Image: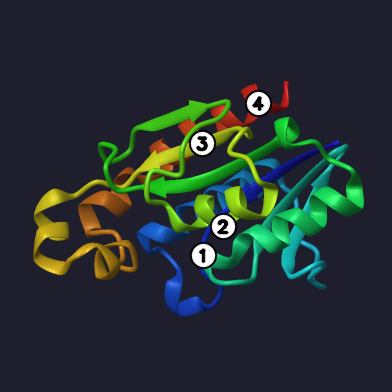
Amino acid sequence: MKLVVGLGNPGNNYNFTRHNIGFLTLDFYFKVKKLSWNEKPKFGAVFGREGDVLFIKPQEFYNKTGEVVHEFMRYYKIPASDILVICDNFDLEFGKTRFRSSGLAAGNNGLKSIDKVLGSSDYPRLRIGTENNELRRKMGDIDFVLSRFTPEEKEQLPEILTEAIKKIEEFLN
């Protein structure tokens, strides 16, 4: 069994924010694959399943996602190497995707939370670039990650999310 985790913050007020690119990616995946989310959360996450793959959107805030991931790992006996975490990266060029089989949190509080609970950073992650240095300088980091995509960026999302889906499929295969 594998686990794919999209990071984000719960609540409609966070839809289409940079920090919620993980949720957005999984929602796009589910739309393309014609899958549906389970209406009843489990272990603090909205979840869905495709064969032997679980997909989750933790309903804890971004920096507390580790506990949710740990509960799914423990219950389903999923090793860290079979978990893919999808998150934003404001230092990565907008729209670029970067897959790594392990790595550092590099300031990402969702990854820090997962690292802390697992006691390790040895799990795959897919980072999606949300860089917009001009906007980030004006707002500061916290407001930036919680900001919505610009109209120009929103136009690019289908192409970016399609690329992210390819990376998810590579991980699953």
Measure how far apart labels 3 and 1 are at the Cα level.
16 Å
Q: Position of residue 168 (x, y in %)?
A: 61, 32
Q: Is residue 138 left or right of residue 3?
A: left
For the C terminus, which image quadrant? top right
Please give the residue where the numbered disc 1 appears in the rendered image. 62
Q: How many angstroms separate mark 1 from mark 4 (CA)?
A: 23 Å
Among numbered discs 4 and 3, the one appearing first in the sequence: 3
Decide: marks 1, 2 in contact (CB < 8 A)? yes
> What amino acid does circle 4 point to?
Phe
Is the residue marked by circle 4 packed among few (<14), some (14-19), or many (20+) residues within 10 Å?
some
| Front: mark 3 or 1 | 1
Q: Secondary structure at mark 3?
A: strand
Q: Secondary structure at mark 1?
A: helix
Can residue 36 be seen here? The reply is no
Q: What residue is at 33 percent from the left and 38 percent from the top?
A: 95
Q: How many marks?
A: 4
Residue 58 shown left or right of residue 135 in the figure? right
Q: Are marks 3 and 2 in contact (CB under 8 Å)?
A: no
Instruction: Tell whether 39 sits left or right of 86.
Output: right
Find residue 113 and name its label.
2
> Which amino acid, mark 2?
Ser
Where 72 sits versus 64, above or below? Answer: above
Residue labelled with disc 4: 171
Q: Callout 3, which amino acid? A: Leu
Q: Residue at x 64, y 70 (%)?
A: 59
Quadrant placement of the N terminus? top right
Q: For the residue marked with disc 1, what is the amino acid?
A: Tyr
